[in-house]
Amino acid sequence: MDHPTLCIVAGEHSGDAHAGHLVQAFRKLEPESRWFGAGGGVMEESGVELLVPMERLSVVGIGEVLVRLPGLVRSMALLKEAVRTRKPDALVLVDLPDFNFRLGRFAHGIGVPVIYYITPQVWAWRPGRTRFLRECVEKALVILPFEEAFLRARGVDAVFVGHPLSEHPPVPCDRAEFCARHGFDPDQPIVGLLPGSRSSEIRRILPLLIGVADHLSGYFPNANFAVPWAPALPEELTGPFRGSRVRFLSHQYHDLLGNSDAAAVASGTATLEATLLEVPHVVVYRLQRLTYAIGRRLVKVPHVSLPNVILGESRVPEFIQDDFTAESVGNALRDLLRSPVESRANAAHLGEAIRRRLGDGGASRRAAEALRSCLEALGRG
C-alpha cells in the first residue's frame, strides 16, 4: 500500500480521544500515512492536521443547533471542500451522527470510501438511520458487543473491534496525593459532580448539581464536593457558583472521578468510565423540553446509561429530566455514602461485569487493522 491519506472527523472529547488512539495505532501499521480533518488535542498530538476544532461541531438539542447553525454550515463547507480537493483514500467518521451523516453522504457521492468508527446508537433510537450505514458506509467499526449482529442483520458490513476504554482505562492518582494537591480532608467523603463537557450541558445540569451539593451537605457537612472542568469550557460558566462549597478542578477529570466516594455523572461516556473505575454513582441528564419531548417518542430502549444498556438491566440509578432534582439525586448519593462498604462492593461487581462484556483491550489496534484491510480491499492508498 502506498502512503494513504485519510480524513477523520470527531466532535467531542471522548471521540477525539478514541480517534487519536486509532490514528496512533494506524501509524504503527502505516508510519507515512497522512491525516486531516476535525477534532481536538489528542488527534492533533497524533499528527492529524486539524481544519476544524471539535468545539465548533459539538452541539446537543434543537435549540443549540439553531443558534450555532451558521458555524456548523461553514465547518461543513470547509470539510467538504477539503474532501473534494484532496480526495483522501477514505473518510473516517467518529460518532457525531447528525454532522457526520451529511459529510459521509457527500464523500460517498464523489467516490470517497466512508468508514464509520463508533457508529450512532441506531439500536436505541431513530433506527431509520441504519439506511445511511447500509448505503454509504464501506465498513462500520463498532464498539459495543451487540452492535455487530444488530447491524449485520440490517445489511451493514459491521465488525466488533472492542471498546476503546477497555484498552485505555482511566488511571487516577493516589487518593492521598489527590487530597493533598487540593486541600481536601482525606477522612471526609469526596463527591464528584460531573455535568458533562459541552457548554449547553453545563448550563442545564450544573445548577442542579450545585443544588445536590447543598442538599447533601446537610447530611455530610464536611464532605469535599468538586466538579471537573474541561479546559475548553468558558470560565464564565462557573461564575454564579464560585461562592458555593463546590470546587472546580481543571485537568483533574479522571483523578477526581477515580477518587470519588460517590458521584453524580451526566449520561455519556463518563458513565462507563465511572463503572470501570468502580465508583459508586448515579446517572443524571436534562435536555431542553422540546428536544426531550421529541426524543421520548423515538427512543427504543428502557435505559440511557451505557452500563445499563450493555447489561440490559437497571444496575445504575438514572435520574433523567424531571426526575433529576437536587433532592432526589442528593438522597441517592446520601444512601451510597452511608453504606460505603456495600456501595464499593456493588460498584466492583458492576465494573467486572462490564469488563467481561467489553473485551480484553486492543480496540484501537483492531480498528486500525480493519481500516487497513478495508483500504487494501478497495485498492486505496
Image: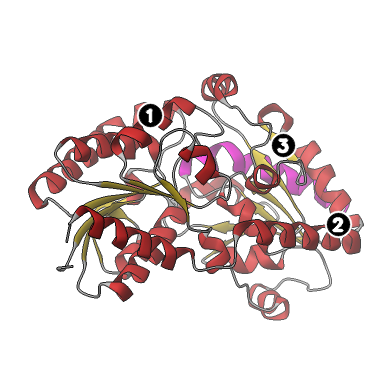
Q: Nearer the viewer, residue 34 or 114?
A: 114
In the rendered image, the vertical position of residue 26 relative to residue 213, given as above or below? below
Residue that label 2 marks: 337
Q: Nearer the viewer, residue 380 or 292?
A: 380
Residue 73 drawn at (x, y percent): 23, 34
Residue 345 drawn at (x, y percent): 85, 62
Number of marks in the rendered image: 3
| Segment colored magenta | 199-219
The furthest residue to the left:
85
Single out the mark in the foreground, 1 or 2. Answer: 1
Task: Give whichever of discs 1 and 2 has the lower sequence position.
Answer: 1
Single out the mark in the foreground, 1 or 3. Answer: 1
Residue that label 1 marks: 131
In the rendered image, the vertical position of residue 31 relative to residue 155, given as above or below? below
- Residue that appears at 63% across and 40% down: 207
* Residue 79, picture quadrant: top left
Lateral position of residue 235 relative to residue 32, left or right: right
